[in-house]
Image (cartoon, rainbow, N blue to C red):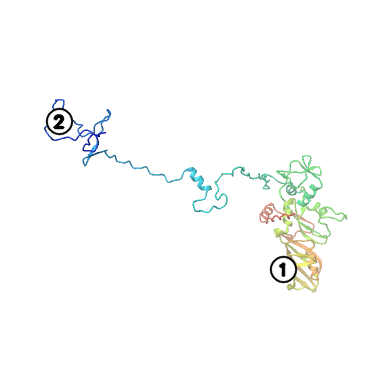
Amino acid sequence: MTLPPKGRSGRPGRPAASNKAASTRRPDGKPAPRPDRAAPNKDRAAPRDGAKSKPVAKIEGKLSPKPVPAKPAAPRDERPSGMAQARSLTQPRVGERPKGDRPFKIANRAPVGKPAPRPAPVPAQPREDGREGERIAKLLARAGVASRREVERLITEGRVRLNDELVTTPATILKNLKGVSVDGKLIAAAAPTRVFRFHKPAGLITAERDPAGRPTIYNALRNALPPGTPRVMPVGRLDLSTEGLLLLTNDGELKRALELPATGIPRTYRARTFGDISQDRLEELIEGIEIDGVRYGQIDANMERRTGRNQWIELTLTEGKNREVRRVLEHLGLQVSRLLRTAYGPFELADLPRGGAEEVPQVLVERFRKTLKTAPAKPKPEN
């Protein structure tokens, strides 16, 4: 098979043009066109199979496609996709040792197959600030029915009812005493707090009644207190032979606060004693003393005056245990012939006559209540 001759471009096609003038006519006898009047498609490649011709650029005598400038590539986003981010949280990086089955946790995502545990519901706790309610024992004590401890005993004995229903626990929360009855008698609303100073004579029992039939302080209070006075309760106790200042109040909560040693309220006594004692030995009581296994706290004791072997001693203490002053003085070898309480906190006996009572002004009572310390709650023993 014979191939056609190659042109200047190195491609098969028509033969290269000649500059000889001898070939001025075509084989068919028609004159050849003049070189200066060549067709505009002279430098173009011959079309194939009727296709339209395309312009080409002529470089160093060879035909090649016209170069097209390349478009700049779009900047590549180097940030990982959402799936890649999630995968990076659960899979260790290259060259990193995994720490456990799942080194990281996705927030707000529960483990597959295990529902997220819900926190246990916290029961609502009743408030004791007066807005949501208070314990019935506290309300009854404030109303002057009895002390807190006595009210708890009344509830245990089944003597307290609420709207004809038996109250079984002193922790019952109430907003007020409406419908509350003790021994079948309805309890009125709590009256304003009142405090009285009473000069207790010797020979009276500090109790409401005595099984032995001895006279009590209430026998003397019938004539000492003014008419219309509500039921009052004694703050602390004075034994049969002790006289002096005894506070009375209609507020059981205030009564309890005054009696607690944790409040640190000082009580001052004057004792007339017989025996030999020195001031140095009395000052040793400031460190406290233990008698027959009972520990007594610090006592500030001072010698007032002495006549022979008789002397008056002033003692200030904050606990007020049963017969504390008498036991301490008898332990020191002294005989107590008279014991008189002269002050209880800021309240003094002063010149109040024996068997007399006088009300403390309301302003002084409220001012004193603001200075009271609150006793810390005792932790319950673990079983």
Q: Which mark is residue 374?
A: none
Q: Earlier in the sequence, mark 2 or mark 1?
A: 2
Q: In the image, residue 291 lies at what x, y percent? A: 79, 67
Q: Secondary structure at mark 1?
A: helix
Q: Position of residue 259 (x, y in %)?
A: 74, 57
Give the quadrant of the C terminus. bottom right
Q: Residue at x 80, y 50 (%)?
A: 153
Q: Quadrant of residue 36?
A: top left
Pointer 2: residues within 10 angstroms few (<14), some, or many (20+)? few
Amino acid type, mark 2: Arg
Q: Nearer the viewer, residue 205 or 100?
A: 100
Measured as percent of width and height from the top left, residue 241 is found at 82, 62
What is the CA distance from the residue labelled 2 to the residue labelled 1? 140 Å
Read off the residue under disc 2: 37
Mark 1 — residue? 287
- Classify mark 2: helix, strand or loop: helix
Residue 9 picture location, percent across and down: 23, 38
